Amino acid sequence: MACHFCDSLHEAQLIEEGQEAHCLTCGQPLYRNRPQSLERAIAFGTTGILFFIAMIFLPFMTLDAQGNSMTTTAGQTVIRLWLNGGYLIAPAVFIFTFLLPFLQLCSLLYLCTPLLSGRTFPGMIFVAKLLNGLQAWVMVEVFFLGTIISLLKLVTLADVSMGLGFWSMVGLMLSLAASVGGIDKMELWDRIELAKARKDAPVEGGLVC
C-alpha cells in the first residue's frame, strides 16, 4: 500500500480491531480497523433512511403572514421550483439533495449488512465503487445552508416556524457523516475481498480480522 502523504510503499499487514497502521517513513495513518465499524455503519445508515423519509413527508417550514399560513414539506419544494420555472434548479435539487443521499445510504446498507455475517451480495464491487463516487456529490448540507440563508430574509416578512422535516434534515446530515465516516475505505474493500474469497476456500490473510 502506498502512503497518501509521502508515497512510500508498504506491505499491508493484518491488524486487530481498534488498531491503526502508520507509515514507517512519515508516521501518517495508512489504514485502520475501527471497532464495531460495520455495526455503526448499519445503525447510522438505518437512522439516516428514517430521517430521510421524515424530511420528505413531514412539515418542513410554516410561514404565517397577515393571517395567511402556508406549510410546505421538503419534497414539495422540488415541485414548487418546477412550477415556478426552475427547470434546471428543480432537477438539481432532487438529484443532489434527495436522490444521491438516498442511494448513498442504501449502498452502504447493501454492503455492510451481509458483511456483518461474512457474506456477500451480487454486485458488491460495483456498489462499493458507486458509494465512493457518490460522496463528493451528496449536497444535503448545501440545501440546508440555502434554507438558513432564506430564513434570514423571510423572518423580516413573515413569522417562520420550523417543522419536524427541518430537524429531520439536521439528523440526516449527521447520520450521513457518521455512517460514511465510521468505516475506513480500505477496511471495507478488504472485508469484501475476504467475504468473496470465503465462498470458495478459507482465507487466512487480510488486513482486517
Image: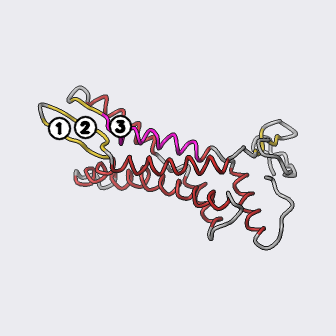
Give the label on residue 62, or none.
2
Percent across and percent down for residue 121 are: 63, 68
Closer-to-camera residue (186/164): 164
Range shown magenta = 162-179
Residue denoted by label 1: 69
The residue at the far bottom in this view is: 200
Numbered tag placed on residue 147 in the rendering: 3
Which residue does the image show at 31% across and 35% down from the upper left? 162
Q: Earlier in the sequence, mark 3 or mark 1?
A: 1
Q: Position of residue 106 (x, y in %)?
A: 52, 58
Kindly report which numbered mark, 3 or 1, lies closer to the viewer in this rendering.
Answer: 1
**Magenta residue check for 208:** no
Quadrant in the rendering for residue 66 = top left
193 and 96: which is toward the camera: 193
Q: Which residue reaches farthest top? A: 156
Q: Residues within 10 Å of mark 2 (few under 14, many from 20)?
A: some
Q: Is residue 34 left or right of residue 122?
A: right
Above or below residue 49? Residue 164 is above
Marks 2/3: CA–CA distance: 13 Å
> First in sequence: mark 1 or mark 2?
2
Q: Kindly indicate whether the residue at mark 1 contacts the one at mark 3 (C-beta within 8 angstroms).
A: no
> Which residue is at 35% across, 32% downward?
149
What is the crowding at mark 1: few (fewer than 14 residues within 10 Å), some, or many (at least 20)?
Answer: few
Q: In the image, is residue 170 part of the stretch drawn in magenta?
A: yes
Identify the residue at horizontal 42%, vertical 42% (top origin).
169
Instruction: Kindly identify the amino acid type of the residue bearing the numbered disc 3.
Output: Thr
Question: In the rendered structure, are the residues bearing label 1 and label 2 in contact, judged by CB atoms less than 8 Å apart?
Answer: yes
**In this view, 42 is above or below 121:** above
x, y percent for residue 1: 81, 51
Of mark 2 and mark 3, the one earlier in the sequence is 2
Q: Which color mode does the image show? A: secondary structure
